[in-house]
Amino acid sequence: MTKEWFYQHKLGLLALLVVFLAIGLLASCDRSEEGGGAGQVQDTGLSADANALAQERGFTPDDVYAALKTYMPTGELDPYIMFASGGQGGQVLVIGVPSMRILKVIGVFTPEPWQGYGYGGSSNDVLASGFMDEDHPLLWGDTHHPSISETNGEYDGKFLFINDKANARLAVIDLRDFETKQIIKNPNAINDHGGAFVTPNTEYVIEGPQYAAPIGWEYASLDDYDAKYRGLITFWKFDRVTGRVDESKSFQIELPPYWQDLCDAGKGPSEGWVFCNSFNTELATGGVELGNPPFEAGTTQNDTDYLHIINWKAAEEVYNAGKYDMINGIAVISMQTAVDEGLLYFTPEPKSPHGADVTPGGEYIVVGGKLDPHVTIYSFDKIMKAIEGGGLDTDVYGVPVIPLDASMEAQVELGLGPLHTVFDDKGYAYTSLFLDSAVARWALGGPYADKHPEEGWTLVQKLPVHYNIGHITAAEGDTATPDGLYVVALNKWSIDRFANVGPLLPQNFQLVDVSRTGDQMKLLYDMPIGMAEPHYAQIIKADKLQPFEVYPEIGWNPETMSIHPNAITSPEEARVERDGDTVEIWMSVIRSHFVPERVEIKEGDQVIWHLTNLERTRDATHGFALSGYNINLSLEPGETQTIEFTATQPGTYTFYCTEFCSALHLEMLGYFLVEPKE
Ligand code: K7E
Ligand code: CUA
């Protein structure tokens, strides 16, 4: 039996195994009633041990099914990779699906010592590029929505983008080495939320706003909220060749000071448009201590807020025509221009909306209202007809509003607290129900209706999850062709699911099997996330990722993705040179020694230290830790890094390798002697 044969027949085999085990369980139950002992069942065709174990642990057939679906024998690789936001940890988590094994935590907005991220090498420059300014570093972020780069509406596995809600920043991660390459501080927004979302060919990375502030967050009294506070959506132009956002070709659109929330880019018929929901069309400004309604009441008075419908292709033309103002170094299309040029429309959405999700074919936009038991489905076709029909009323800021009955296709009652929606290949949608703590599977209508046995726009199944689900994500779920084997519920509370680790509890990612139609969703696995509160995640087919195994050549600079000018290719080139007060070191790093092993300098010297890992063996990473100087690098095979510092502390220091790279790893060290000034 070949491996391929096994994979092709895996589901069948699993089902067979489950049936066997179920029979075994039943048979053994009968026996124990007759006084028979456990572990004596021999008639199932299975080893008595596995059967006995399942029985001993009280497994149901569902448990056995779940175990068989998620277990990865050693050396077997997960078919899917999930990129999850790391929430206020400021990172991205890389997780194998369905085994739910954490493969990596990528440092993004927060220094990360394992990767030596922010402890001396070129990653310091990446982090620094996202600071407020030189004097105001930002050393954490609140990551919410990871977004894999797309080609023709499909994840292409090349780049990953993620926003920092806390400080309105965007990060670019190169999936050749899974390292953060760029952080951009939005020059006109101080917080964001509706990012990162890509357009179907990653022309732009969308960064939507959230809590309104004056453009450039200049001081303005809350009494001037209506006039001076604004929303702001940013279209960051992405350059695939450089692998960076080009700020000089990016633009923003001024929006009313509603709190724009989640966005999603249109595709297929709706390509060229982006849809963002909003809340606080009440323009509440809080001040419960002054006798005002608290924000939670002030922002929820209206029965509807506005879905923002933005024509980014037309906005690009407006930008190219120069109809913008430069504000803090970036082009801003004013709200008036956006209205005049037909870039911006609204339609009402009930009530306190959160997620806005475009169906795989791009025909519909699904909105979940946190305080409405329905999801509302908008038809892009109807929206276009309403816009073409003209004669629309406007909101107080002059933005045309399409009436709900002119834009809506359907509403489906799902339950309490619908937030986010994802899709599969069977014409089903999955919506997270925060208050119900459930995943709702419902049947899409329109062109999706003949993919499933149910009638369109109907609820099919509600699967309880544990507990308080926020986002939900599906395999290839945001693409034009979702896969539909797995859904992951990203639960905010875990309460009793794991051992008590004190009053701060982990989040709970729950893997859900959605491979079968009808009410056959099954919970497969609980994965505690004990490092922060993730929000969104995306799941890509693992074979779409083609990362380096080792850096392509010795002397590789991950920042430029090219050869470092100060790389060396052998220990013979290692040396120390002095020029006045500047000491420059070219160091080779290979199992199990640094060359040179002694670096002797004087207090106050400027140190420029180049390190090259000469290894070509996969996994032969060396660390470089310099005691007392807050320096710590991770040098992957082929990598060159440069650190620069002033030797302000005299004394005897050691540097050593932090990765257990060989039997003589402990011997991989050197002395750094700083002779005191006279
Ligand atoms: Cu619902 Cu930031 Cu997308 Cu959290 S957000 S859940
Ligand atoms: Cu190199 Cu340990």
Image (cartoon, grey):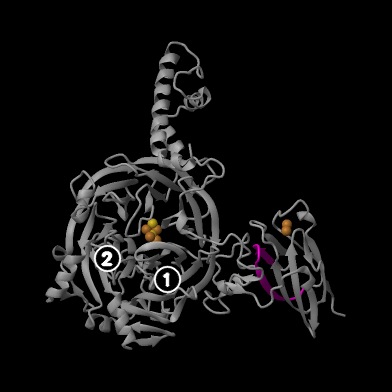
Q: Nearer the viewer, residue 440 or 168?
A: 440
The residue that label 2 is drawn on is 268
Which three-letter amino acid code belongs to the residue tagged 1? Asn
Q: Position of residue 123 (x, y in %)?
A: 60, 70
Q: Nearer the viewer, mark 2 or mark 1?
A: 2
Magenta-drawn stretch, dominant element (helix, strand or loop) = strand
- Which disc, if any, is residue 191? 1
* Left or right position of 244 against 479: right
Residue extent of the magenta highlight:
630-649
Q: Position of residue 448 (x, y in %)?
A: 22, 53
Q: Position of residue 129 (x, y in %)?
A: 54, 76
Q: Position of residue 235 (x, y in %)?
A: 37, 75
Q: Is residue 607 visible?
A: yes
Residue 158, relative to residue 418: is it above or below? below
* Left or right position of 450 against 213: left
Residue 484, relative to residue 332: is it above or below? above
Label whose residue precedes the other's in the sequence (2 or 1): 1
Which three-letter amino acid code belongs to the residue tagged 2? Gly
Q: Nearer the viewer, residue 632 or 519?
A: 519
* Left or right position of 621 against 422: right
